[in-house]
Image (spheres, rainbow, N blue to C red):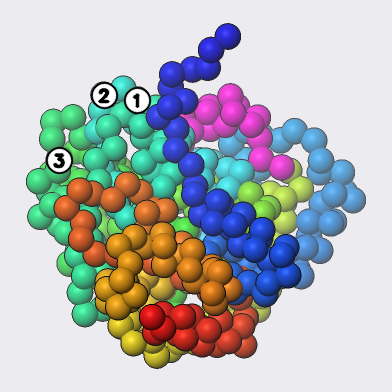
Amino acid sequence: MEYSKQLTKLGTETAFAVSAKARAWAEKGNKVYPFHLGDFNLPTPNNIVEATLKGIKDGKTGYCPSEGIFSLREALANDVGSKRGVNYLPDNVSVQPGGKPTIGKFIASVMNPGDEVLYPNPGYPIYESQIEYQGGLAIPYNYITSDDGFDIDIDHLKASITDKTVAIIYNNYQNPISAESSIEEMEAIADLAIANDLWVLSDDAYYEIIYDGEARSIVSIPGMKERTVILYTFSKKFAMTGWRIGGSIGPKEIIKHISKLNVNAESCTTHFIQDAMVEALNGDQSGPQYLLKTLKERRDATVNGLNAINGINVALPKSTFYVFPNVNEILRFKGMTKVEELQEGALKNANVSFCTRDHFGRPSKNESDYFIRFAYSGINVDDINEGLSKLKEYFESK
């Protein structure tokens, strides 16, 4: 017996492998400072938990519509549309078991084998994986460093569009680098999509993890709502990564295709969790407000701790819960040639666990800089300060 050749094209999310190494190190009796995974050590707001338990007691445990229950699709349409200045109806929404399924189902709906899809690199590794697994060509576009962090290389993006390009994946408020588009940058992407008649997947996973200013969406630009599918997830705003609940929001026709894929993949998303998400969107918002306040405190502590290390200088991110420092000087000082060596040394000598740039898409051949990523959503301020103090000692020692 043999396995499918297609499986050789399927990637994975290697941050979970980093998590496994950290767990193994902790099981040996070490206190690990976990900066590796964008998960939470904060509870899901209580009103959501109570609504979920009520749904179970009320018997909402059977099958429900593949596209999602009407009350949640209506709540999502109103919430997502009002916060982006556009109008959505329930028929523009397909409920998903998490944010991730939207990626694969969007690609399945717009791409044929041999087509090209542009995706951000570094970026969420499942973009690359799903494009290639489904027989497409994953074409990366890159970022350039700026005073505020990172900007999309628009010239490179434009030059990468060919007659085989069918879509752009766009992740404003970006994982892993926390990049945030200016209005001009967002409009430039919209212009390219419209001029070349391309679909856009707008990954809005971190749309409401904003510390300063107002969130902006590409769908608010004229001509973009008609060609954009929004990836929505409850995981980040409500600290419920393991609940697996999200949505695809976009033009009615493509949402019909995505909902048909729901039937084939999972029949439906858990009924009582869907029911509770109506409370999450329409009920008491003090829970997510507390989460955002806590994340901001952790962001400040993380940035301050990293900038106290000789050889590191990072800008203050205005969104997400990640920091992406350049460690070229650290590697040179320690006489290392591989960032993985630095990563392993940090775990064994400082008990600090983090991911590297290589966990977020294949590096291009011409990349010469080395980066590591810190997630601060799952570690409290005292441990951030303690862990980064130990990391400073390790990074600054020969």
**Residue 135 circle label:** 1
* Residue 138 horizontal/vertical position (percent): 29, 37
Instruction: Please tell me whether mark 2 sits on a helix, a strand or a loop.
Output: loop
Which one is in front in this view, the residue at disc 1 or the one at disc 3?
A: 1
Instruction: Please tell me whether mark 1 sits on a helix, a strand or a loop.
Output: loop
Q: Is residue 116 left or right of residue 216?
A: left
Residue linked to disc 2:
114
Q: Earlier in the sequence, mark 3 or mark 2?
A: 2
Q: Residues within 10 Å of mark 3 (few under 14, many from 20)?
A: many
Query: Which segment is the magenta one?
Result: 255-270
Q: Is residue 209 magenta?
A: no
Query: In the rendered image, which quarter contains the N terminus?
Result: top right
Q: Is residue 150 left or right of residue 10?
A: left
Residue linked to disc 3:
161
* Residue 242 horizontal/vertical position (percent): 67, 54
**Residue 173 circle label:** none
User: Which residue is depicted at the point 47% across and 25% down?
Assistant: 7
On screen, residue 132 above or below 386 = above
Between the residue at mark 1 and the residue at mark 3, the CA separation in whole angstroms equals: 18 Å
